[in-house]
Each structure stands twice: as C-alpha cells, then as structure tokens.
Image (cartoon, rainbow, N blue to C red):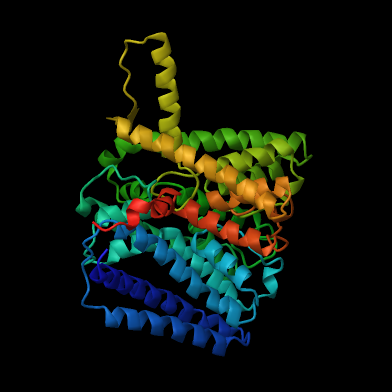
Amino acid sequence: MKWDDIKALLRLIGILLVAEGGLMGLCLVPAVHFADGTVVEMSVCTAVTLGVGGVLWGCFRRYRRIGDRRMAYLLVVLLWLTLTVFATLPLLLTGATHSITRAFFEAMSGLTSTGATVFSDVQSLPASVLLWRSMMQWFGGFGIVLLVVALSSRLGINRYALYTAEASGADNSGRRVVSTVLAVRRTLAVYLVATVVFIALLWSSGMEMWDAVNLTFTNISSGGFSVNGDSIASVTHLQQYILAVAMLLSGVNFTLLYLFFTFRWRQIGHKLEQFGFYIVLYLLSVAFVVGGLHWSNGYNWGDAVRLGTVQTISALTTTGSVVADTTQWWTPVCFLLLMLSICGGMAGSTSGGLKIMRVLILLRNVRGILYSRLHPNAVMPIRLNGQVVSGHIRSNVMVIFMVFGLTLLLGVMLLMLCGVNATEAIGASVGCLTGYGPGLGASGGFGSYAAFPPMALWLCSFLMLMGRLECMTVLVLLLPRFWRRG
C-alpha cells in the first residue's frame, strides 16, 4: 500500500465526516425549539466533526485516485469505524451516557441500522439526541459507502469494488461501473422520495411532525429506533399500518421500486422472482403468527391480524420496531421472528440478514443436488430471474452462509463467556448480526441491552459491524496476504 493511497483514503473519510457534521448541525433545531439545554454541546460536536473532516478533506484534496483495489475493503471498514467514533460525541457530551462503551454501542447500532439500544427510557433523552439517533439510522440505512459511490463523480477507485465491499448482498447482476453508479443513484432517489412521502402520510394521519420525522427516518431505513419507550405500540392502528408499509417497501430492492414508480414495466418482468418469494414468505409467516397470537395468546382476530402483520414485516425486514411485548408471545412465534430476521429482505434494500436472494439460490441449489442424486447424468442449471446462476456465485452463497452461521455460533459462545445467559446470548447474537436489534429475554420486546456487561457490548458492536458488512469485508482484512506489499 502506498502513502498516496492512504492519503486519498483519508480524503474520502474527511468528506463523510463533513456530511456527518452537517447532520449533527441539524440536531440544533430541536435543541433550540424544545430548549433541552444541549445547544452548546451539540454545537461543539458539530464543530469538532466538521473541523476534523474539513482538515482531512483540505489537506489531502489533491489525492483523488486510489490505485490499490485492496483499499476498497480497508476504506469501507475505516469509514464505518471512524463515523461511529464521531457519532458517539453527541451521546457523551450531552450527558445521555457517560460510558464510552455504551455510547459506541448506541452509535454503531444507529449507523448500522440495527436498532439495539442501551437506553431503557429513551423518552428521558434530550430532543437533540433523539433526532441524532434517528438521523444515524437514516444516514446508515442507505449505506454510507453507497452515498460515496452515488455522489462522487471523481472517486478514483474501482466503484464496483467499493460497492460490493459495502453491500456484497446487493443486486449486482450488472458488472459495469456505470451501471453500478446508476443503480445506486436510483436507489438514493427512491430513498429520499419515500422518506418525504411517509413523513407526509404520518403527519396527515394525525401524528405530530416530530414523531413523524423520527419514525419515518428509523423505519424507512430498517432501523427501529423510536422516540417512545414502547417503540411504535402507542401510535394509532392506522399509523402502525402506515409504518408497516414503509417497512415492507424498505425490504424491497430499491432499483425494482424505481422501475415500478417510473412505469418501466418491461424492465421489471424478469426481476420478480426474488420479490415473489419475499411476498410469499411474508404471507405464510403472517398466517402462522396471527394464528399463534389468536389461539395461544388469546388476542381477538382484529388485534392478532394487526400485531402479526406489523411485527412479522418488522422481523423480515430486520427493522426491529415493536408493537407489543413479544417476550410474552407464544415461543414458536418468537422463534419464527428470529428466523425471519436471519433471512432478511431483498438484496439491494436497506434490510439486513442474509437476504432473500441468497436463501432462494441456496434452496434451488439443494433441490438441484437432490435431483442429481436421482438422475446423476442430468444437467439441471440453477436459474434466478431467468438467468443461469454460475457455479462461482453458488459457491459464494454457500461460503457466506457458512461464515454467517459460524460467526453467529461464535458470537453466542463469546457472549456466554462474558456472563450473558444462553437465551440472551442467542437473541443478542442474532439481533446484532442480522441488524434486527431486539433479542430474547431482557433485550427483547420493549427491553434494552442496558444490563449487558461492557465486554458483551463491545462484542455486540463488532457483530453489528460484521452483519452490516456481511462478514466477508471485515474478515478479508484479517488475512496476512492483505497487508503484504504488491
């Protein structure tokens, strides 16, 4: 690695720090409006972040090109870590928490759109901090690196490598750089428009603008943070359904949404397999959850349908918004919700998990293997969206499943070694690695991770980063060959 490459990397980090500082500056609006006493603290946070970002951007502005492809992976990891460190400033300086561990956990959860929190009473937080938590999820939900790809016309690095390093589960069927940038810009356009639309819908339904803005930011990004201690349980039934639609759309491939809302029907036709599987899986899961809530928990059919519909889509899209104390629900229902969060939404969406696309390829691969046992000489190619899935892609999917599973099991073991009981460890490992957020026991439902020991919180923060970057981007940095010259 050359020094010029590192300087170009620092320049890009500076650009994103300036963007993050700009978002911090917007948090001064509720600080002044609600007079929450954090104007000075938020001003300092904004100034420090803008200052550091501006210095990096200015000092290394001449270094625009990165010649080493390996720097894409290093850039992605450093971006997330650096922005997370600076995101802790509003939490620490405003007194929301005095623990660096808790602040880092909350910031990582926000930027990775995980939704796990260490605050057991979020309503007691200053208004500026509440907006900052929501903005972190909105900013991170789209993907910080995807913003770089979308908005930087002279990035100087292999944009496709950078795109896949941050979102290896994206719908990257196109291989041209131009196609990648175009897809990301379309995604950003849909993301911005959807944000404005759902703020307007919630506000028109009678919700206060403050709540509408925060809940839209956290649900359209598949985040799950809330300004209320009971998540979205206290909003009206209509508003819960509106948020459910926002969550449902956030789990759909954004390029597909762009084609749909721009009436490009011909380009949609061959891309519906993943969407069809997504909808079928959701409907079958809703039927099971609704039945479980009615017959095992005693809810009437109206409440069972509402709660089951909203909570199931929250789990499948790894949003993590909660409409009831799910820790009291029938155990098979709770287990299904965790399994859905592992599955996740569609590739190219804001949701986490393994992604529907990978699950579908895996299932078809299993079917092909079983068929070959009956007909050893038959050739049965695996197809997705009308195209043959190459052996290279199939092997990558299998490897990611294996790495994801091993990381999940290792996370459970290490959390238990930190003193977390088995049930909590399983729920926390799944919730943090998938980006769902709520776990089991005290960390599930309306609970929080406040009781977790410091070492467990650091481990959960690492699991969030691993899940957001889909494991492989972080693991590649651990290879000795990565750090060798040449």
Check the picture and name the quadrant holding the C terminus: bottom left
Q: Residue at x 59, y 72 (%)?
A: 130
Check the picture and name the quadrant holding the N terminus: bottom left
Q: Residue at x 28, y 53 (%)?
A: 161
Location of residue 283 (image quadrant) = top right
Q: Position of residue 87 (x, y in %)?
A: 50, 73
Vertical position of residue 290 compared to residue 162: above or below: above
Q: Position of residue 284 (x, y in %)?
A: 57, 32
The front one of 264 and 56 is 56
The front one of 108 and 8 is 8
Residue 484 visible in the picture: yes
Q: Position of residue 269 (x, y in %)?
A: 30, 36
Q: Position of residue 57 (x, y in %)?
A: 30, 79
Judge from the rendering whether residue 350 lies leftward or rightward of residue 241; answer left or right: left
Q: Residue at x 65, y 58 (%)?
A: 456
- Disc count in the image? 0
Judge from the rendering whether residue 52 lies leftward or rightward of residue 325; answer left or right: left
